[in-house]
Image (tube, helix red, strand yellow):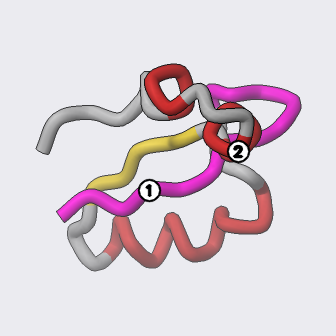
Amino acid sequence: MRILYCDCVFDNKIIEPDYEEEKVSAINLGFNYSLISFEELTDGNVAIALRLVKDA
């Protein structure tokens, strides 16, 4: 299973700081994660929003 988290508004290569603890818990439980761009998603740019999501 892969969990999707929003990227940081200022740096799209890192997770939004509000989700950092949740990400650490997910990793400790064996889950994978990818980042999405909430801003691009709400602007309708789905392909750009999901560009960092890896295949399962």
> In the rendered structure, which segment of residues is drawn in magenta?
1-13
Magenta residues, dominant SS class? loop
In the rendered structure, the answer to whether residue 55 lies left or right of residue 50 reads: left
Mark 2, residue position: 42
**What residue appears at the point 26 percent right and 58 percent down from the top-left corner?**
2
Q: Amino acid at mark 1?
A: Leu
Location of residue 33 with respect to 7 vertically, above or below? below
Q: Residues within 10 Å of mark 2 (few under 14, many from 20)?
A: few
Location of residue 26 with respect to 2 vertically, above or below? below
**What residue appears at the point 75 percent right and 39 percent down from the top-left corner?**
39
The x and y percentages for residue 49 are 55, 31
Quadrant of residue 32 within the rendered picture: bottom left
* Element at label 2: helix
Q: Amino acid at mark 2?
A: Thr
Mark 1, residue position: 4
Which sits earlier in the primary sequence, circle 1 or circle 2? 1
